Image (cartoon, helix red, strand yellow):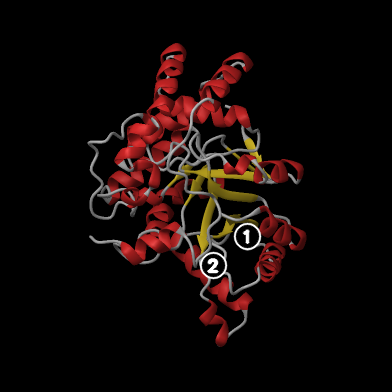
Amino acid sequence: MKCRKLRDLKVSPIGTGCMGFSHGYGEVPGKEYTIEAIRKAHDFGCNFFDTAEVYGRERFYEGHNEELVGEAIEPFRKDIVLATKLHIDENALKTTKLYNVIKSHLEESMKRLRTDYIDLYYLHRLNEFIPVEDVAGVMGQLIDEGIIKAWGLSQVSVETLDKAHKVTPVSAVQSLYSMLERDLEKEIFPYCLKNNIGVVPFSPIASGFLSGKVTVDTKFEGYDVRKFVPQLSKENIIANQPVLDILNKFSKEKNATNAQISLAWMLHNYPNAVPIPGSKNQERILENLGAWNVELTEEEFNSLEKALNSCKIYGHRGHEESQQTSFANNWLQNKKV
C-alpha cells in the first residue's frame, strides 16, 4: 500500500466513509458492531476516516455519527487523519460573527469526536448567502491557531474552489465521482492536480450499483437515500447494465470483485484521488479497502477506459450542490418514512 497526500495530509489510498453507520442506507448496525467495523478498518491499514456533524440527525440527533466515530478511534486517534464537516446557517450571523459560528461548530464536533484538533475540516455544502471567501478566511485563522490542520470543500464548482483557494489553500475537495458520475474530470481534477489539492470521491461505487449487488429487485425502504438516487431507478439500473458487464469481465480476469475494480480504476486514473466508500458492512469495508492491492496495468486500464467510454450513462446527478440545492436537502423535504 502506497499512501497518498491531501496537500500535506498523508492518508491511505482509500478511506472509510462513516455516514452509513448513522443514516442513509436503511437500517443501521448496532453501536458495538459499528465500533468494531471502524477498528477493523484501522487494523487493515486505513488511516483516513470521514464523518460530519449532520450524519444521523434525521434518525437520531445531530452529532450521532461523530460520537460513534469518536469512541471508535479514541485508542488510535493520533495515528489517523480525521475529517468532519459543518453546515453554516446564515441566520446565526445575525447575532455573532462568522468566526464565532464556525468555531462553535468545531468545538462541538471535537467534543463528540473526543479530540482537541481536527485534521481536515470541510464546509459540507456552500451556503449561497455566505461568501466562500469569508469561510476560507476563518479556516485560515483556525489553521493558524492549530485547531485544524487543513480544510476542504464539498460539491463545489471550480470557480468556487478557486475563490476559496486564493484566500486559504484548500487541501481537499470531497465530491461525487464514480464510473457513472465523471463530471469532476472536466475541471475539478485538472485544477486540483495543478494546485496540489486532493480529491475525495464519495459514493465511488455509485451507491452500491457498481458492486453488482443492487438490482431491480432491491428495495430501498425507510431512511435510505438511495430511493432518490437517479441511477438507482429501475429503468436506469437496467439501462446501465453494460457497465456491470464490463466490470464482471475485468473482475474475473483480475480475481477481484466488481467494487474493487471500480476503485482500482479510480486510483489508477488520478494520483490525487482518495475515495471513501461508505459501506456499513464489515466484510464490504475490508473488501473495498483491499482494492488498493488490485493494480491495473496501463494496458488493462486503457482497455477498461475504452469499454466504459462506449457506454451511455443514465441517471446523471452532477457534482455541484449548495445547502439550498443539495440532494440531501431535497431528500429531507420530500422523504416519507
- Viewer-proximal residue among 221 and 260: 221
271 w.r.t. 334: above or below = above
Q: Residue at 43% across / 43% down in the picture?
A: 315
Horizontal side of residue 201 vs 35, given as left or right? right
245 w.r.t. 162: above or below = above
Residue located beneath label 1 in the image = 148
Quadrant for residue 106, please give it: bottom right
Horizontal side of residue 240 vs 273, given as left or right? left
Query: Could you tell me if residue 151 is visible in this image?
Result: yes
Residue located beneath label 2 in the image = 106
Q: Residue at 75% across / 46% down in the picture?
A: 195
Type of amino acid under label 2:
Leu
Q: Tag 1: Cα neighbours inside 10 Å, few (<14), some, or many (≥20)?
A: many
251 w.r.t. 327: above or below = above
198 w.r.t. 55: above or below = above
Q: Secondary structure at mark 1?
A: strand
In percent of width and height, residue 49 lies at 49, 46
Total labels: the figure holds: 2
- Viewer-proximal residue among 264 and 325: 325
